[in-house]
Every structure is written in C-alpha cells, then in structure tokens.
Image (cartoon, rainbow, N blue to C red):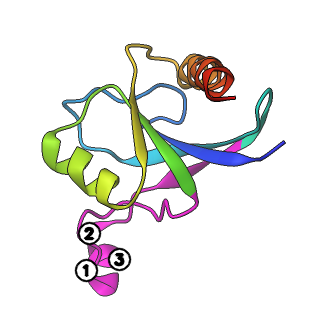
Amino acid sequence: EHDMKIAIESNDGITIKSPFLKTKGYLVYDIDESHINGFEYRKALSQKKAEASVVKNRLPALGDCKTIISRGMNRIQLQSFKEEGKDVFITFKTAAKDAVRLYMKELLISEGIQH
C-alpha cells in the first residue's frame, strides 16, 4: 500500500473553498488505497512572511502532495500546478471529506483499468 498526500483548497478546514475566493490554506489528507490515515491544515503564508521568503503565490509548501483538489481554478494556477508535476482534480462537492472519498474511488477505478 503506498501512501500519498492530497491537498484540498480550504479556507475553514472543513469545506472546499469557493473558486471566487482567495485560497487561505489547504487541508492535506494522507491516504492510501483504501483509508484516510489523517489530515492537517496548512495555512497560506501572510504577506509579510511571503515577502521574507519570496514566495510568489503565498501558498504553503505542497511539495509532498501529488494532487490538488479544487472547485475550480484559473488557467494560470492550473498551469503552475501542472509544471510542478501535480494533478488537479476538480470537484463539485463542498465537503472536503466527500471529495477525498470520491477521489479515492476514481483512483481505484483508474488503477483497476491500468493493471
């Protein structure tokens, strides 16, 4: 079983943020094929911290996350995630946990097809 981390755009740590709001942080879920092993909330950096560390988009480090789950993002964001080698999974769900479960289901289906 291989563990992987997925990041969900969330401003409150429960729901997936609206595409029209600025992203304040990410819920990072640790999952394997069949379980959610845990999660943490990573806040976006404040303006001051971001300037100190010269972070373009002031988002927390998501280097360990393979996939970003979103309710919609613009082409620029999409492009920059793709360049970092990340998958973007667009969902219509609002509860983060529902979206994670759906993602895991999709993952199982596509894995099943590949084998």
In the displayed image of the protein, which residue is found farthest to the left? 75
- Label placed on residue 47: 2
Residue 10: % across, % down: 44, 36
Q: Secondary structure at mark 2?
A: helix
Q: Nearer the viewer, residue 54 or 106?
A: 106
The dot on residue 49 is 3
Residue identifier under label 1: 51
Mark 2 vs 1: CB contact within 8 A:
yes
Q: Residues within 10 Å of mark 3 (few under 14, many from 20)?
A: few
Percent of width and height locating residue 27: 55, 42
Tag 3: amino acid? Lys
Quote the CA–CA distance across marks 2 and 1. Answer: 6 Å
Q: Nearer the viewer, residue 49 or 105?
A: 105
Residue 89 occupies quadrant: top left
Residue ranking furthest to the front: 115
Depth check: give the residue in front, 41 or 102.
102
Q: Say which quadrant the N terminus sits in.
A: top right
Q: Relative to 38, is 52 on the left or the right?
A: left
Q: Are marks 1 and 3 in contact (CB under 8 Å)?
A: yes
> Is 34 displayed left or right of 86 in the figure?
right
Q: Is residue 98 left or right of residue 67?
A: right
Q: Residue at 33% across / 25% down in the picture?
A: 71
Question: Which disc number belongs to residue 9?
Answer: none
Residue name at image x 25 percent, y 80 percent: 51
Relative to 94, residue 41 above or below? below
**Callout 2: few (<14), some (14-19), or many (20+) C-alpha neighbours within 10 Å?**
few
Which contiguous range is marked in magenta?
39-64
Q: Tell me if mark 1 has few (under 14), some (14-19) or many (20+) residues whose alpha carbon lies within 10 angstroms of its own.
A: few
